Amino acid sequence: MSVDLATVRRIAHLARISVSEAEAPYLQQEINAILNFVEELNAVDVEGIEPMTSALPMRMKKRADEVTDGFITEKVLANAPAREDGFFVVPKVIE
């Protein structure tokens, strides 16, 4: 698969990236190099190879799924200009 200059300009437009006329040929080469590399990867036989999430096998550390307030209420409210009963006091916005 090969990308032409019109496609480079379209990609730049969709990505909202400003690309000058001088930069477009360079980007075309870069995109084509990336696509060629992906084609090489697609040629690799991966039959029988299990997907992996890490180079080293490790178990995920798990913790109990409990709802807490973080136990730092006083630290959170320490810089509040006004507080009441463990909550921030803010001006009324809606009448």
Image (tube, grey):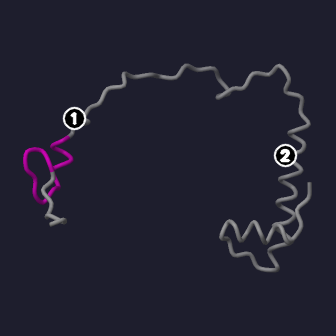
Can you give x and y, in whole percent of width and height, for residue 22 in the image?
82, 79
Q: Amino acid at mark 1?
A: Phe
Residue denoted by label 1 = 71
Dot 2: element: helix
Residue in the image at 12% along x and 44% along y: 86
Q: Which residue occupies the foreground of this view, 85 or 37?
A: 85
- Determine the residue located farthest toward the front in the rendered image: 95
Q: Amino acid at mark 2?
A: Val
Residue denoted by label 2 = 38
Residues at circles 1 and 2 in contact by the CB criterion of under 8 Å:
no
At label 2, counting other C-alpha atoms closer than 10 Å, the crowd grade (few under 14, some 14-19, many 20 or more) is few
Can you give x and y, in whole percent of width and height, for residue 92 in the image?
14, 64
Q: State whether residue 50 is above or below residue 79.
A: above
Can you give x and y, in whole percent of width and height, for residue 74 in the image?
15, 43
Q: Which residues are magenta?
A: 73-87
Q: In the image, 12: left or right of 91? A: right
Q: In the image, 33: left or right of 85? A: right
Q: State whether residue 78 is above or below residue 65.
A: below
Q: In the image, 15: left or right of 7? A: left
Magenta-span inclusion, residue 85: yes
Can you give x and y, in whole percent of width and height, for residue 69 in the image?
24, 36
Q: Distance between the Cα atoms at labels 1 and 2?
A: 49 Å
Question: Mark 1 or 2 closer to N-term?
Answer: 2
Number of numbered labels in the structure image: 2
Residue in the image at 83% along x and 61% along y: 30
